[in-house]
Structures are given as C-alpha cells and as structure tokens.
Image (cartoon, rainbow, N blue to C red):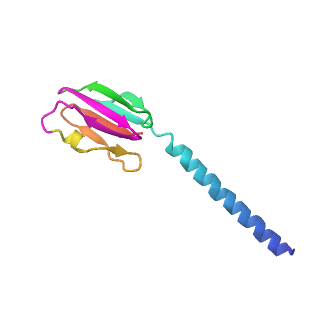
Amino acid sequence: MKKKELIMIVGIVVIALGIFAAVQFMNTQKNKDVIRVIYKSTTVLEFDPNKDGEYWFDGSYGKLMVEVKNGEWRVTNEECPNHVCSSTGWVSADHYLPIICLPNEISVELK
C-alpha cells in the first residue's frame, strides 16, 4: 500500500468518526429538552416533555392545564375568553411553537 492510499484511508476514517460523534451529540442534546411554564416573567415549573402528565396552573384570569403525552404538549381546559392557547394544539420539539395565554399571563416554552 502506498503512503498516499494510507493517508486517504486514515482521512476517511477520521471524517466518518467525526460525523458519528456529531450525530451522537445532537441526539443527546435533543433528549435534554425541557419545557418551561412561565407566569408573569417567572418560571413556575420545568418538566421533561418525554414524561406523560397533566399540570394545572392558576393564572391571572383563571386556571389552565398543560397536558404532556408522547413527547408533545398542549394547553387545555383553560379559563379565558378566546381559547387561543388551546387552539394552538399539540406542540413538540420538532414542531415547536410557544404557547401563550395572554389573559392568564402564562407561556409554555421550550428551553
């Protein structure tokens, strides 16, 4: 084997290892997503979007619930006049949109 061929093989292996490491890093970062519920500019709760649950909050106008299921979350059962935050629907880290309930002064955001 010639020296140039050996250098090329080593270069290809180094590039492949670099790509593999980058993909692994991106996957571990994706799994560390945290959802924050903010009330009047203060974080009141942080939770893992991969653990199913229901979280109730008292806002300025009334109560609302954040439902988490299968890595997605949504606002439901809110007490506000227009129900804009519940019409946002299910949100996930892949299709992210902050959910904001202005009458309750509550926002649900991806950290």
Instruction: State whether residue 94 is above or below residue 35.
Output: below
Q: Is residue 67 visible?
A: yes
How far across and down, in percent of the image, does residue 65 sit? 27, 30
Q: Is residue 41 visible?
A: no
Instruction: State whether residue 28 is above or below residue 40.
Output: below
Quarter of the picture holding the C terminus: top left
Q: Quadrant of residue 103?
A: top left
Magenta residue check for 84 = no
Q: Which range of residues does the magenta coloring cover? A: 61-82
How far across and down, in percent of the image, does residue 3 sit? 85, 73
Q: Quadrant of residue 76?
A: top left
How far across and down, in percent of the image, does residue 5 sit? 81, 74
Q: Give the residue displayed 66% in from the left and 57% down from the top.
A: 18
Seen as rendered, the residue at the extreme right is 1
Instruction: State whether residue 27 is above or below residue 38.
Output: below
Q: Give the residue displayed 40% in from the left and 33% down from the top.
A: 52
Q: Is residue 73 left or right of residue 28?
A: left
How far across and down, in percent of the image, does residue 77 sit? 22, 31
Q: Is residue 18 left or right of residue 42?
A: right
Magenta residue check for 67 = yes
